[in-house]
Image: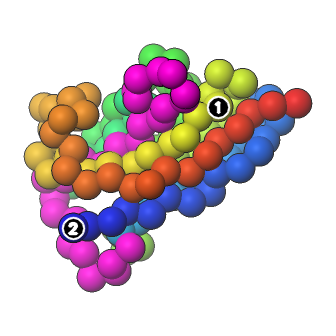
Amino acid sequence: QVQLVESGGGLVLPGGSLTLSCAPRDATFVIYSSYVISWFRQTPGKEREFVSGIHWRLNKKWYAESVKDRFTISRVAAENTVYLQMDALKPEDTAVYYCAINPDGRLSWNDQSKYDYWGRGTQVTVSS
């Protein structure tokens, strides 16, 4: 079972920035060209929601409307890592952020049931 590891969460003031990273714990894990790697977030009492995703080969990116123009997803193939740059953070961005892999997500990037591998999450808190 592949384990993904998220890092970079923390406490930040409103308007601040954070960069999250996601990588397989096993450095030998192969990320195939068809994979979509996405970020989701969840707050207590709410359903987990899609934040942003990236197609590994096509470099096509998707964003939730609530984060468009503030968050930027990217990937560095040499590092086997996906990053989520979060700017202009708002209190409503507070959540546990998870990364996940969809092995063939070009058309199902927004379907959580298609994601086979998940990380344990990293807490992001936006508060003054």
Q: What element carries label 2?
A: loop
Quadrant showing the C terminus: top right
Q: What residue type is labelled 1?
A: Thr
Q: Which of 24 and 96 is in front in this view?
A: 96
Q: Label 2 neighbourhood size at 10 Å, few (<14), some (14-19), many (20+)?
A: few
Q: Label 1 neighbourhood size at 10 Å, few (<14), some (14-19), many (20+)?
A: some
The residue lying at 62 percent from left, 57 percent from top is 8
Q: Is mark 1 on a helix, strand or loop?
A: loop
Can the viewer see residue 76 in this picture?
Answer: no
Q: Would you place residue 13 above or below residue 120 in this image?
A: above
Quadrant showing the N terminus: bottom left
Task: State which region is magenta.
Answer: 25-49
Which label lies toward us, 1 or 2? 2
Q: Does the magenta stretch include residue 57?
A: no
Can the viewer see residue 26 in this picture?
Answer: yes
Mark nearer the N terminus (1 vs 2): 2
The residue lying at 37 percent from left, 62 percent from top is 4
Residue 111: x and y in percent read 21, 30
Q: Would you place residue 71 above or below residue 54 in this image?
A: above
Q: Name the residue under label 2.
A: 1
Q: Mark 1 points at which residue?
A: 94
Q: Which of 82 and 117 is in front in this view?
A: 117
Q: In this view, does 54 lie to the left or right of 46?
A: left
Residue 125: x and y in percent read 71, 38
Q: Which residue lies furthest to the right in this view?
A: 128
The residue lying at 13 percent from left, 32 percent from top is 107
The residue lying at 25 percent from left, 75 percent from top is 29
Q: Which of 33 and 44 is in front in this view?
A: 44
Q: How many marks?
A: 2
Q: Does the magenta stretch include residue 44?
A: yes
Judged by its main secondary structure, the magenta piece is loop
